Image (cartoon, rainbow, N blue to C red):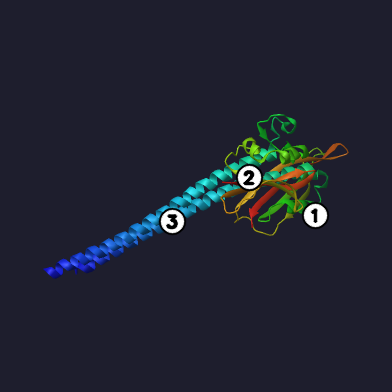
Amino acid sequence: MDKRAQLEGFDVIVGLFIFLLLFTFVSTTWQEIFNLTERGRQLERLKLKAVELSDQLALSPGMPGNWQIASDYNKIGLSVKPRKIGLEKLNAMQNADYNALKTKMNIEGNDYWVRITMQQQIVFEKGMQRERSLSAKVERIVSYQNNPALLSVIIYE
Amino acid sequence: MSDCRGYAFAAESFLAVLIFIMFFSISTNFFLAETENIFSRVVMKRIALDTLDVFDEINNPNLVDAAIITEMVDSVLPERLSWRMQLTQQDLRAGDFVVANVFLVGNTTTDISARDVVKAKRLFLTYDSGQVQFYNTAELWLWLE
């Protein structure tokens, strides 16, 4: 009788041990999956912002269209016609305040880095690069001073 | 006897949970990978449209020069992308559309039927002494290396 009771006690301990093992495994995996999907959602939002910003810079002249000489403006754009970068607009962006531009690009709360390269040479750069943070990069082909160039837009979380 | 059955039940439970977790993890990864793929296509489509627009904007007089087209596209496209362009020139001066020239440039050897390819198309005119010379159709295919 005593022997059977000891065996049942042993069963309970083994059962408990297996349960705890499974519970830890399942909860850890769930947490990892949750983090992965949450990170995926964050990345998705960033990518969407990067695409929208690249559209705004490469395709739109800004608002107003002559924002580079206006005293106040709502949003910036770099093109004089779609995909054709205007030098004056580029200079105005270069001289504008980094944080003020975030509002004009509708990315408050994010950091950004915009770069134009032509023949592997950097011809324009604005913003800051950050390491080890979630980021989304979008590249667009534009015309700069009648040459093809690559516009890169990176947005950081 | 009853102890053995207990262990067998625990092992089966463990195996069932393990299979469930594996299935769930794999399906989640597939979902995330698919989302990434959609984004890549959205961006690639934009790059393809950009390329043809810029090509039309700055390269009009040199449309028939395959070497210039290749150099131009290669100089700006991100390295991870491969491309192929077909340029068809049609002449209407005889009263009906006649295909005058067809150029195929870029990566013309890769079989793209099995690849995830985005395609952009643009129509534009080229002139000779102020008169329309050719009605051009440029088609660009882009895919990841």
Looking at the rendered image, the disc whose residue lies closer to the viewer, 2 or 1, is 2
Q: Residue furthest right?
A: B129
Left or right: residue B6 versus residue B55 is left
Chain letter behind tag 3? B
Visible residue check, residue A117: yes
Between residues B135 and B41, which one lies in front from this camera angle? B41
Rounded to the nearest angstrom, the CA distance separating label 1 from label 3 is 48 Å
> Do circles 2 and 1 both sit on a common chain?
no
Q: Name the residue under label 2.
A: A112
The residue at 71%/42% (across/down) is B122
* Nearer to us in this view, B83 or A75: A75
The local crowd at label 3, few if under 14, some if 14 to 19, many if 20 or more residues have their Cα within 10 Å, is some
Using the image, name the chain to which the residue with label 1 belongs.
B
Q: Are marks 1 and 3 in contact (CB under 8 Å)?
A: no
Which numbered tag is attached to residue A49? none
Tell me whether circle 2 and circle 1 mark residues in contact (CB < 8 Å).
Answer: no
Name above or below for residue A28 compared with residue A145: below
Q: Of the residues shown, which amino acid type is indicated by label 2?
A: Tyr
Name which residue type carries label 3.
Ser
Q: Indicate which disc residue B67 carries.
A: 1
Tag shown at residue B25: 3
Q: In this view, does B40 lie to the left or right of B1?
A: right
**Numbered disc 2: secondary structure:** strand
| Residue at screen point 62% across, 36% down | A103
Q: Could you tell me the amino acid type at mark 1?
A: Ala
Q: Which of B97 and A33 is in front in this view?
A: A33
Label 2 and label 3: CA atoms lie apart by: 33 Å
- SS label for mark 3: helix
Measured Cα–Cα span from mark 2 to mark 1: 36 Å
Q: Which residue lies furthest to the left in this view?
A: A1
Quadrant hosting residue A58: top right
When asked about the image quadrant of residue A85, the answer is top right
